[in-house]
């Protein structure tokens, strides 16, 4: 079979396109493919395995689409088979139903396995004690509180590498999504809820963090650096923040929670119980639900609806964002 010039030209263009896509895969914009933490690495495994499995179907189908169109085209003296009354072949039927079914079964099993393995609230295996960081998404900034260190930061977060970080996340503004792509997948921040996300960086470095869920006018500025350092550098940094930064007061927080953008900021102290206060302020003091984590504290959203949540008891007038966040919370 001799390739015509047109067909050959098409093949060259297609392979160049493919090459361009593959080569650009190492660029900065593909951070998900360059994980720096244990969770991100498992998630990359999952991406590669599922892509590979899909290619078992995708590649032959694309190749056949071109080969068949070329081989069985209408031309004088064609030697290709022509069977206009052909309608069934059991072997072929088994082949093109069997392979996809098998792939779906394998995909399902792998996805289920990784879903439990990578449950965000599950503690990561490590001989080091996790560091707790409480994250609040605001309009339009990120507040990070370190309850054990008694400090807080805005729009950047710092923690030691190779130490598990246990993020607790909520929102005091419309729903957002917390994402450090090189360390692991995103998780929603929602008012009235404390989500948990466990991540760990394998090596020191500055990783891009962002709000991955549209949350209003300045949503695009909700980017932050996640700095993984050595333990010594982290201890030094905490000491430095404690001795040089201003204190965060309740009034200071209320000001911070107002709409607006700002650069980075450090605080040498935090008001006692601020995070819990933020979580429960929309719900008359109860936590509506926590995804995963300790079962005793969690109440599923569906259960709440079944039990008939008393909406009249909720003060819906306190904030516009209450209604925003809850209507957005439909998952
Ligand atoms: Cu939720």
Image (spheres, rainbow, N blue to C red):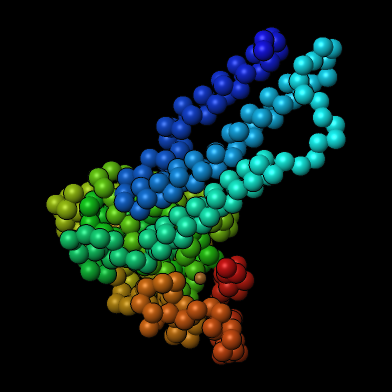
Residue at 63% x, 28% y: name it: 63
Image vertical order of residue 155 relative to residue 206, above or below: below
Quadrant of the drawing holding the N terminus: top right
Q: How far from the left and from the top, in percent, is residue 228?
A: 27, 49
Q: Quadrant of residue 84?
A: top right
Query: Residue at (56%, 20%) from the top-left corner?
Result: 16
Residue visible at 45% across and 55% down in the picture: 110
- Report the label total: 0
Quadrant the C terminus occupies = bottom right
Can residue 263 be seen in this snapshot?
no
Left or right: 36, with 78 as reference point? left
Residue 293 pos. (x, y %): 37, 73
The x and y percentages for residue 86 are 81, 36
Tell me which corner region of the image, top left, top right, bottom left or bottom right, holds residue 297: bottom left
* Identity of the residue drawn at 56% across and 59% down: 215
Q: Nearer the viewer, residue 254 or 90?
A: 90
Q: Which is nearer the eye, 82 or 221?
A: 82
Q: Is residue 255 above or below residue 83?
A: below
Q: Is residue 64 above or below residue 282?
A: above
Q: Is residue 30 above or below residue 309?
A: above
């Amino acid at each position: 079979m001799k390739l015509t010039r047109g067909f050959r030209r098409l093949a060259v263009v297609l392979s160049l396109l493919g090459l361009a896509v593959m080569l650009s895969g190492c660029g900065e914009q593909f951070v998900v493919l360059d994980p720096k933490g244990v969770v991100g690495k498992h998630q990359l495994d999952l991406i590669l395995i599922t892509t590979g499995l899909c290619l078992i179907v995708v590649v032959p189908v694309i190749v056949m689409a071109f080969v068949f169109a070329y081989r069985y085209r209408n031309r004088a003296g064609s030697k290709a088979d022509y069977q206009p009354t052909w309608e069934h072949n059991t072997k072929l039927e088994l082949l093109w139903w069997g392979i996809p079914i098998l792939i779906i079964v394998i995909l399902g099993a792998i996805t289920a396995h990784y879903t439990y393995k990578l449950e965000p609230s599950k503690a990561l295996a490590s001989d080091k004690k996790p560091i707790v960081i409480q994250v609040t998404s605001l309009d339009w900034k990120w507040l990070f509180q370190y309850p054990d260190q008694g400090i807080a930061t805005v729009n950047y977060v710092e923690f030691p590498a190779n130490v598990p970080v246990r993020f607790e996340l909520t929102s005091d503004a419309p729903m957002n999504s917390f994402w450090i792509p090189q360390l692991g997948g995103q998780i929603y921040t929602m008012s009235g809820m404390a989500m948990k996300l466990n991540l760990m960086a394998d090596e020191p470095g500055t990783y891009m963090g962002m709000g991955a869920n549209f949350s209003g006018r300045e949503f695009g500025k909700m980017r932050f650096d996640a700095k993984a350092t050595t333990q010594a550098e982290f201890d030094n940094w905490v000491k430095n923040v404690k001795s040089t930064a201003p204190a965060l007061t309740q009034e200071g927080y209320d000001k911070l929670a107002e709409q607006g953008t700002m650069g980075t900021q450090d605080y040498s102290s935090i008001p006692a119980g601020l995070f819990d206060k933020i979580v429960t302020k929309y719900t008359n003091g109860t936590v509506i639900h926590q995804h995963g984590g300790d079962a005793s504290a969690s109440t599923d959203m569906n259960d709440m609806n079944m039990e008939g949540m008393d909406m009249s008891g909720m003060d819906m007038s306190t904030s516009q964002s209450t209604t925003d966040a809850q209507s957005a919370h439909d998952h």
